[in-house]
Image (spheres, grey):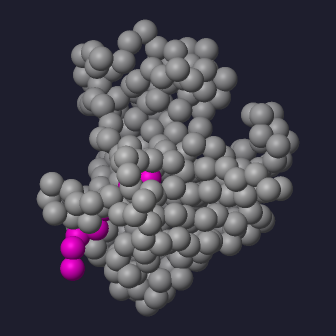
Amino acid sequence: MIAEPIDVAVGSGYFVGRVDEDAAAAFALATNDHNELYQTGRATPPLFTASLVLAASVESQHRGGEHQLVKDARGSVHGEHDVLFHQPVRPGMPLRWRANNHGVKQTKGGVVVTQRILVTDIEGTPLVEHFWSNFHIGGRVASDLGRSLMDHTFPDGARSRPIGSRTIPVARDQGFRYAGVSGDHAPHAMDDEMAREEGYPSKILQGMCTFGLCSGALVDIGAGGDVFRLRRLAGRFSAPAFPGCDLVVNAYDAGRTPEGNMAVAFDAVQTSEGIQTAVVKHGRAEFHPI
């Protein structure tokens, strides 16, 4: 049950920037996405704006008192992410963005805190809308606050309708490549000892690195590489993904949205020493029809 809304006025200030063509191409290569649209400067990778908004997200966390609000957490990780694509973000465009509180929800395993980060053009036209959720492990809050997340639960019966699968090689230095293009130097992605202190056996990938690896496969499967048809990309990070271990993205027909867009359900798995682990669950991508 959602209680009174969290104060959406508490968040970051406005940030401004420009989409650099080379930065967009480098982001694509760092997430193993070889779509020629990015290398020829005709488009930007779907999640490129995540590299721009990270500072706003951190500022919003501090201003909103996220870590003071959540009690007894043993640590935090990127829990899930949902992105709406309203208009294309093209190389060379000047942009403006701001992060705001969106919602706080208690779960059995901890607390999910979500920020809404809206990226617009300079005139304020919405382009990309991120719903960035951090999971505070073992944390607790007095009550749920703010707004609920949009549903992207894997639909019943979708696994009987597979539409494609892609295997994405993951390099041992993948997390470092992603850090270089995104500014996301999460300690557990940069240092084995820091990762072990958080309970992982070794370095893990940043959540958005894993999501970026998935995005290229989904645009390929769902739209034949036409990123301009992508309208939504969502998923839950169910387990850490590790460098040096291939990622397999499996996609399924999930029908049509009320707006008539094609819906694709997906998950992503890694297999190590014969054990398969789902690292992204309840994935959903939506595409404008041709």
Residue 193 position in % (x across, y down): 85, 42
Is 1 placed above or below 81 here?
A: above
Main secondary structure type of the part rendered in magenta: strand
Q: Is residue 18 above or below residue 63?
A: below
Residue at figure coordinates x 44%, y 66% from the top left: 162
- Quadrant the N terminus occupies: top left
Residue 175: image x %, image y %? 69, 60
Residue 284 covered by magenta stretch = yes
Answer left or right for 166 relative to 187.
Answer: left
Residue 221: image location, x then y, percent: 43, 75
111 sits to left or right of 198:
left
Quarter of the image that includes the C terminus = bottom left
Taking depth in this image into account, of 2 and 262 the one nearest to the observer is 262
Specify start and end residues of the magenta stretch as a single range.
Answer: 283-290
Q: Is residue 142 magenta?
A: no
Q: Tell me if residue 121 can be seen.
A: no
Q: Residue at x 39, y 55 (%)?
A: 158
Q: Residue at x 40, y 35 (%)?
A: 114
Residue, far top: 142
Q: Give how far across and how far down residue 249 sits, in percent.
A: 55, 64
Q: Is residue 96 left or right of residue 244?
A: left
**Where is 15 relative to 135, above or below?**
below
Q: Residue at x 61, y 50 (%)?
A: 278
* Residue 175 appears in the picture as rendered: yes
Give the number of callouts.
0
